[in-house]
Image (cartoon, rainbow, N blue to C red):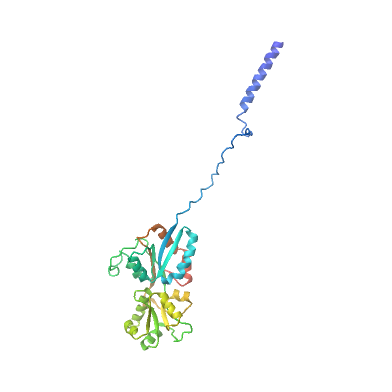
C-alpha cells in the first residue's frame, strides 16, 4: 500500500512540473527581470520624415524701372513661398538692361517694358530686330507677362490746363509748353514717338524748338512732372498711379500700339530651375494681384 501511494505521488509531481514548463512562453505580459533593457520604440506607420532644408539660391532679376514698386513688394511675398531664394533686383530702362545683359552682366530673369528689347536678345527673333544675332533667351521660358497703358500726366494743379492728347498735340505745335518723354532707346519713349507720329508731329523739330524734355527712363520722366519742371509728361499708367499723378488721358492702341511686358529666363542663368519657378510665380494669383492693384493687366 505504501509502495502504491509513493508511485502515485511521484506521478503527480512529474505532471505538475511539465505543466509549469509549458506555460512560461505564454505569459506575454510578464514584468521583465530588473536590469533587462527596454525594447526599442517603433515609430508609428503614419510618421513622416522631416523635410530637408533646401540649399540657398540667389536669383538676379533685371526689371523695367516701371516695375520698381510691384517687384519690390513681390520680393517680400516670395520669401514666404521660397525662403531659400534671395532675389536681387536691378531696375532701369529696358534698353539699358538689355545692353548690360549683352555686355555680360549676371542675370537670371529679364522683364522688359517692351517686346523689342527681348527680341534683340532672342536668336529666334527676326534678323531685322536682333541685328547682332544675340542668343541670351532660354527657349521655352519666354512669355508675355503683363499689359500696361500709356498715360498723359500733369503736375499738381495742371497749370497749363492740358486735358488730352489732342490738346497736347495742338499745344506742342503752337509752343509755350514743355513735355517730358523717354529717350528713343526707352520703351516709354518709343511709345511716345508713336503718339507723335500719330499726330504727324516731327519730334526732331519739336525738340529743336525747346518743347520736349527727355528722361533716360520712365522714373526720370515721372520726377520731372512731380517737380513741375515740365508742364506734362508721357509715362505708364502704373507709374502715374504709384506717383500719385493726375492722368488726364490714356493713349489708345491705334496711337501707340499695345504695351506688352515680356519676361524670360536667360540661358546664362546659373539657377535656371529656380528662375523658372520664380517666373511661374509671377503669373500666379498672388503676384498678379500686386500687378493689378497698380493698373497692370495680365497679358
The percent coordinates of residue 48 (x first, y second) are: 52, 48
117 above or below 154? above
Q: How many marks?
A: 0
* Quadrant housing the N terminus: top right
Examine the image and state in which quarter residue 6 appears. Answer: top right
Examine the image and state in which quarter residue 223 appears. Answer: bottom left
Q: Residue at x 40, y 80 (%)?
A: 180
* Quadrant housing the C terminus: bottom left
Q: Residue at x 39, y 87 (%)?
A: 171
Q: Is residue 274 visible?
A: yes
The percent coordinates of residue 231 (x first, y second) are: 42, 84
Examine the image and state in which quarter residue 57 appears. Answer: bottom left
Viewer-nearest residue: 53 or 276: 53
Report whether 81 appears left or right of 196. right
210 above or below 71? below
Q: Is residue 291 visible?
A: no
Q: Residue at x 37, y 68 (%)?
A: 97
The percent coordinates of residue 273 (x first, y second) are: 40, 57
Viewer-nearest residue: 57 or 64: 57
Q: Residue at x 69, y 17 (%)?
A: 9
The percent coordinates of residue 280 (x first, y second) are: 43, 61
Identify the residue at the far right of this view: 1
273 above or below 196? above
Amino acid at each position: 500500500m505504501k509502495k502504491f501511494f509513493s508511485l502515485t505521488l511521484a506521478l503527480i509531481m512529474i505532471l505538475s512540473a511539465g505543466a509549469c514548463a509549458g506555460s512560461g512562453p505564454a505569459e506575454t505580459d510578464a514584468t521583465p527581470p530588473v536590469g533587462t533593457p527596454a525594447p526599442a520604440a517603433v515609430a508609428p506607420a503614419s510618421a513622416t520624415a522631416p523635410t530637408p532644408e533646401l540649399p540657398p539660391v540667389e536669383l538676379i532679376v533685371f526689371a523695367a524701372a516701371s516695375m520698381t514698386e510691384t517687384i519690390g513688394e513681390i520680393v517680400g511675398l516670395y520669401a514666404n513661398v521660397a525662403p531659400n531664394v534671395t532675389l536681387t533686383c536691378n531696375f532701369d530702362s529696358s534698353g539699358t538692361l538689355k545692353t548690360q545683359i549683352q555686355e555680360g552682366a549676371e542675370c537670371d530673369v529679364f522683364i522688359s517694358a517692351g517686346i523689342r528689347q527681348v527680341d534683340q536678345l532672342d536668336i529666334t527673333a527676326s534678323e531685322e530686330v536682333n541685328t547682332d544675332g544675340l542668343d541670351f533667351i532660354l527657349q521655352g521660358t519666354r512669355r508675355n507677362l503683363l499689359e500696361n497703358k500709356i498715360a498723359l500726366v500733369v503736375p499738381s494743379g495742371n497749370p497749363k490746363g492740358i486735358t488730352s492728347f489732342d490738346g497736347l498735340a495742338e499745344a506742342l505745335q503752337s509752343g509755350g509748353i514743355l513735355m517730358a518723354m523717354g529717350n528713343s532707346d526707352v520703351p516709354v519713349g518709343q511709345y511716345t514717338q508713336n503718339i507723335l507720329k500719330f499726330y504727324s508731329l516731327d519730334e526732331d523739330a519739336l525738340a529743336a524748338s525747346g518743347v520736349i524734355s527727355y528722361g533716360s527712363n520712365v522714373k526720370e520722366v515721372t520726377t520731372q512732372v512731380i517737380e513741375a519742371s515740365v508742364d506734362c509728361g508721357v509715362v505708364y499708367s502704373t507709374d502715374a498711379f504709384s506717383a500719385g499723378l493726375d492722368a488726364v488721358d490714356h493713349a489708345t492702341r491705334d496711337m501707340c500700339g499695345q504695351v506688352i511686358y515680356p519676361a524670360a529666363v536667360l540661358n546664362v542663368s546659373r539657377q535656371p530651375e529656380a528662375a523658372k519657378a520664380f517666373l511661374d510665380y509671377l503669373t500666379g494669383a498672388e503676384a498678379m494681384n500686386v500687378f493689378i492693384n497698380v493698373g497692370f493687366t495680365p497679358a
